[in-house]
Image: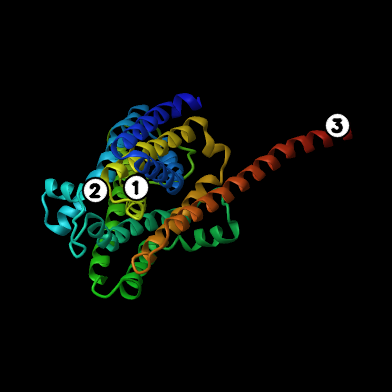
Amino acid sequence: MILRIFGLSFVISIAALVVAFVYGGPEALLLTVILGILEVSLSFDNAVINATVLRRMSEFWQKIFLTVGIVIAVFGMRILFPLAIVWITAGLNPVQAFDLALNPPTDPNADSYESLITAAHPQIASFGGMFLLMLFLGFIFDDKEITWLSWLEKPLIRIGKLDQLAVVIAAAILVITATFIAHEGEGATVMIAGTLGMISYILVNGLGELFNVEEEGDEPSTGPSDLAKATGKAGFFLFLYLEVLDASFSFDGVIGAFAITADPIIIALGLGLIGALFVRSLTVYLVRQGTLSEYVYLEHGAHWAIGALAFILMYSIGTPVPEVVTGLVGVALIGAAMISSIIRRRKETDEPADDAALVDSKE
C-alpha cells in the first residue's frame, strides 16, 4: 500500500534531486532537499483537510485532483504564481520576469526577483489568511457530533448559531489588521486582498452547497459541503475548492522559500516536484487507509492548525514570522490531536473488554 501510494513521489523526488545537482551542484541539491522538507512540514494540515474533501469525491474527480491538480500545484503555484507577481508589480513581460529570476541584477539598488516577491507579501498574506480564516471559522462554528477541545468547541458551536457570525468576525479581524498591523500605506491593499479572499471562500463554498447531494446519515464536515461521492458539477466545484485551498496553503511556503533561495528552478524542484507531490501522496494515503475515521480528532487538529496559520499570515503582514514557527505550531496541534485520538481509541477498545469481564463474573 505504502509503496504503491508513495512510489511515484519517491521516483520523481530522486529525479528532481539529480536535476538539482546537475543544475547547481551540491549547493542546489541541499537547497532542494531543504525546500522539500519545508513544504511537507508546512502542508501536513493541508493534506488532512484535502483528505476530508477528497474522500467525498467520485473516483474520476479524485484522479483529476491527483493528476491535473498536481500540474496546477507544481507549475501554477510554484512557478507561474511568483512570476505573475513580478509581471504585475514590476510591469515586466513573462520573458523579462523569468530572466530577472535567473539573472539577479548586479546593481544593489535595483529591484531583484526576490525583493519584488517579498514586497507583494501583504496582499498575498491577506488573501490567503482570510480564505483560511473563513475555513477555520466555518468549522469551529459548525454543529459537530464529536468535539476535541470540548470545553472550547461546544461554546463556539452554540454562539455559531448566530447567522453569518464567521463573516462578521473575519471582517473585523481584516479591519484590525489593515488598521493596526499593516505598515503605513498598505492598509487599502490589505483590505482589498483580504476581501477578495473572503469572497473567494464564500463563492466556492456556496457553489458546493448549491450542488449538495448529501446522503442521509452523513455527518457534517469541512469544505463547501459534504458530497456523497460527488460527480458532475458537484465534483467540479469540490475540485475547484481544493485548488483554491491548496493555493492558500501554498502562499506561506512560496514566500518562505525566498528566505532560502530566489532561484525559480530550485524552488520548483523543492516545493513542487518533491514537496507538493508528497503532500498529494499523503492525502491519498489518508483517504485509502481511512485514517480520518480511525483518528477522529485529526480533522479537528488540522483545522486548529489552519486557524493558527491564518492568524500568523495576518500578523506577518506587519511583522515577519519565521517559517519554522509556522511549521512547529501546525505539527504541535496535529500531533496533539493524533495523541488524543489514540487515547480515545484505546478507551473504546478497553470498554467492551471490561463489559465482557463483568458479564463473565456475574455468570
Q: Earlier in the sequence, mark 3 or mark 2?
A: 2
Picture coordinates of residue 111, whole percent (x, y)? 19, 61
The three-letter amino acid code for the residue at tag 2 is: Phe
- Which marked residue is nearer to the observer: mark 3 or mark 2? 2
Residue matched to label 3: 360
Picture coordinates of residue 262, whole percent (x, y)? 28, 51
Mark 2 crowdedness (10 Å alpha carbons): few <14, some 14-19, many ≥20:
some
* Disc 3/disc 2 C-alpha distance (Å): 66 Å
Is residue 146 placed above or below 59 in the rendered structure? below
* Disc 1/disc 3 C-alpha distance (Å): 53 Å
- Which marked residue is nearer to the observer: mark 2 or mark 1? 2
Q: Is residue 65 left or right of residue 4?
A: left
The three-letter amino acid code for the residue at tag 1 is: Leu
Of 214 and 283, the residue lying toward us: 283
Of 361 and 309, the residue lying toward us: 309
Of 62 and 323, the residue lying toward us: 323
**Secondary structure of residue under mark 2:** helix
Is residue 285 placed above or below 115 in the rendered structure? above
The three-letter amino acid code for the residue at tag 3 is: Asp
Residue matched to label 1: 245
Residue at left offset 52%, top offset 33%: 290
Residue at left offset 25%, top offset 70%: 186
**Residue 233 image-quadrant placement:** top left
Q: Tell me, yes or no, whether the two marked residues, 1 and 3, touch with CB atoms within 8 Å.
A: no
Of 126 and 266, the residue lying toward us: 266
Residue matched to label 2: 81
Picture coordinates of residue 315, whole percent (x, y)? 39, 66
Residue at left offset 36%, top offset 44%: 27
Q: Earlier in the sequence, mark 1 or mark 3?
A: 1
Mark 1 crowdedness (10 Å alpha carbons): few <14, some 14-19, many ≥20:
many
* Disc 2/disc 1 C-alpha distance (Å): 15 Å
Q: Is residue 341 visible?
A: yes
